[in-house]
Image: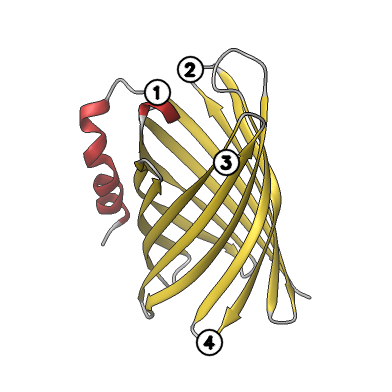
Amino acid sequence: MSALSLLLLALWPALGWAHDPVETWHEIDSSWLLGKASLILHGQIRTNSRVGNFGYGRFGPMVQVPVRRLTLGGGYFYQESRPALIDWENSHRLFVLADIPIRRGVVSLNTRPSLERFLAPDRAFNRYRQWLRIQREGKRWMPFGYLEGFVYRKGIYAWRPAGGLRYQITPFTQLEFGYFFDWRIRPAGGPRHVLFTTLRFRWRE
């Protein structure tokens, strides 16, 4: 499947929401191998077109450990957000996850269920997250696509079809960029278009 096909696959649900806001999300992950485990420091910032500037940031560590065919992990993020032209709000996110390979080879398929706990000054809630990703392997330029769904106690929270490209800059450095349509319930901000980048560094012991 070509990168263009993956991007079109991600675009199709957005055709009816052409007037929704456009945001950019940028992530950096830096990981170290510590024996069999990996320590990952993660950071993300988002621009918010409705605010006109920087609207969200998070930072925190996570640990992942291979267990047979799975990879189990967990971590913590500190978050700052500005949902409107008001003061910044801080919150905390705790999570556990399992990365499960479904298919390996020239084209890989992975799924990742995770459970998240959000803690804010005026509220706390749990969210279940399910991620399914398909990707071309073994090339310097690798197209990928994924579908991500979110559920909380009241039902569906959001879902995100996405497509993009991964570029292998060096054996230990990767850059991903692409697009997804973030359909989410109105109380959580409503639908939006997102252009994203992810830069990953992997360091030796």
Marks 2 and 4, how far apart at CA: 45 Å
Determine the secondary structure under disc 2: loop
Marks 1 and 3, how far apart at CA: 17 Å
Give the residue at mark 1. 21
Which quadrant of the structure image shows residue 172? Answer: bottom right
Q: Are marks 2 and 1 in contact (CB under 8 Å)?
A: yes
Upstream in sequence: badge 2 or badge 4: 2
- The residue lying at 69 percent from left, 45 percent from top is 59
Badge 2 density bin: few <14, some 14–19, many ≥20, Cα 10 Å: some
Give the residue at mark 4. 68
Q: Is residue 14 left or right of residue 85?
A: left
Identified by mark 1, the residue type is Pro
Mark in the foreground, 2 or 3: 2
Which quadrant of the structure image shows residue 108? Answer: bottom left
Badge 1 density bin: few <14, some 14–19, many ≥20, Cα 10 Å: some
Determine the secondary structure under disc 3: strand
Identified by mark 3, the residue type is His
Pick the front one: 66 or 188: 188
Give the residue at mark 2. 50
